[in-house]
Image: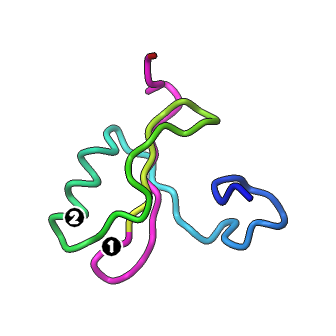
Amino acid sequence: MNVLQKQADNPIHGAIPMLKVDSVAQWVAKVEASGGTVVIPQMVCPCTQTYFAVMTGPLGNQMMFKEPKDHKVSS
């Protein structure tokens, strides 16, 4: 199962807020500096070819940071 896909059998479907940001790397650094941790490190989303990462904030809430589709990673 791909936990990043919105499908009926995905147990976390809709459970993780996704925040669109201009730079995933900058937001990962900000969350880590405030005491958060990386759950899934920055990588390229296979669907949109843009960067994303999943973090847990200092209060324990998970969130996904994702760059907009017009920020495609060049090969």
Answer few, some or many: residues within 10 Å of disc 2's Cα (few below 14, many 20 plus, some between 14 and 19): some
Q: Quadrant of residue 35?
A: bottom left
> Does residue 18 sit above or below 52 in this rendering?
below
In the rendered structure, find residue 39 and report the number of the disc placed on it: none
- Whether 74 is drawn above or below 67: the answer is above
The quadrant of the rendering that contains the N terminus is bottom right
- Drawn side of residue 59 relative to residue 30, left or right: right
What colour-coding does the image apply? rainbow
Callout 1 secondary element: loop
Where residue 52 sits in the image (x, y, percent)?
45, 46
Identify the residue at horizontal 23%, vertical 46% (top origin): 26
Extreme residue in the front direction: 1
Residue 54: x and y in percent read 44, 59
Q: Quadrant of residue 31?
A: bottom left
Is 1 contained in the magenta span? no
Distance in Å between CA atoms under marks 2 and 1: 8 Å
The one of 62 and 21 positioned closer to us in this rendering: 62
Query: Magenta span covers which residues?
Result: 56-74
Which one is earlier in the sequence, the residue at label 2 or at label 1? 2
Q: Position of residue 44 (x, y in %)?
A: 48, 37
Residue 70 in picture, x, y percent from top left: 49, 25
Q: Which residue is mark 1?
A: 57
Query: Image check: 54 left or right of 49?
Result: left
Q: Amino acid at mark 2?
A: Glu
In the rendered image, the residue lying farthest to the left is 33
Task: State the residue position of label 2.
Answer: 32
